[in-house]
Amino acid sequence: MAAIAAKSLEVSRVFLLSRTEVTNATEVIRSNVQAGIQVSIVIREDIAADPDLPDIEDMSLVIDQSGVTGVLMPGAPGEPDIFTAEERQVARAEDILDFLLPYARTVDDIYLDGRSQPGT
């Protein structure tokens, strides 16, 4: 996370969580915010009725300083994560992100209700 602190890397993360998972994810979200990651949250129930809902799987879209784009996907249990710059995988990740972003809410929108929020 030194690269984030040094401003040489900017990281954004979109969590897709059900309303009940939001409470359970507080510590994970707090650690991401404290690490300098820009966190957004999409509530699964908010997108469930959308007729254009794509098949969403866990993946990270990665763009480095030079503009190289790739996708990081979880490996099978016990296996390392998989990184690929394959164009179809990158396009799929971009499409999913484009679909989710209009539904994304800030950490404050989700947690700011008089309790301590994940960033504190």
Image (cartoon, grey):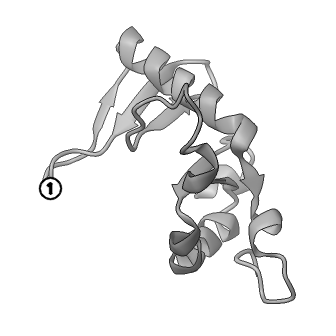
Residue 60, placed above or below residue 17: above
Spot occupied by residue 78 in the image (x, y as percentages of width and height):
12, 57
Q: Residue furthest top?
A: 87
On the image, the x and y values in percent for residue 88 come to: 38, 11
Which residue type carries mark 1? Pro
Residues 18 and 70: in front is: 18
Residue at the farthest right position = 114
- Tell me the residue that label 1 is attached to: 77
In percent of the image, x 14 and y 55: which residue is there?
77
Q: Quadrant of residue 97?
A: top right
The one of 115 and 39 positioned closer to us in this rendering = 115
The quadrant where residue 103 appears = top right
Relative to 20, residue 47 above or below: above
Residue, x 75% and y 64% (percent of image)?
Answer: 107
Assign the C terminus to one quadrant of the image: bottom right
Task: Give left or right: position of 47 versus 72.
Answer: right
**SS type, badge 1:** loop
Up the image or down, 47 lies above or below 71; here it is below
Compared across the picture, whether 112 is left or right of 69 comes to right
Q: Residue at x 55, y 25 (%)?
A: 52
The residue sitting at 38% across, 19% down in the picture is 89
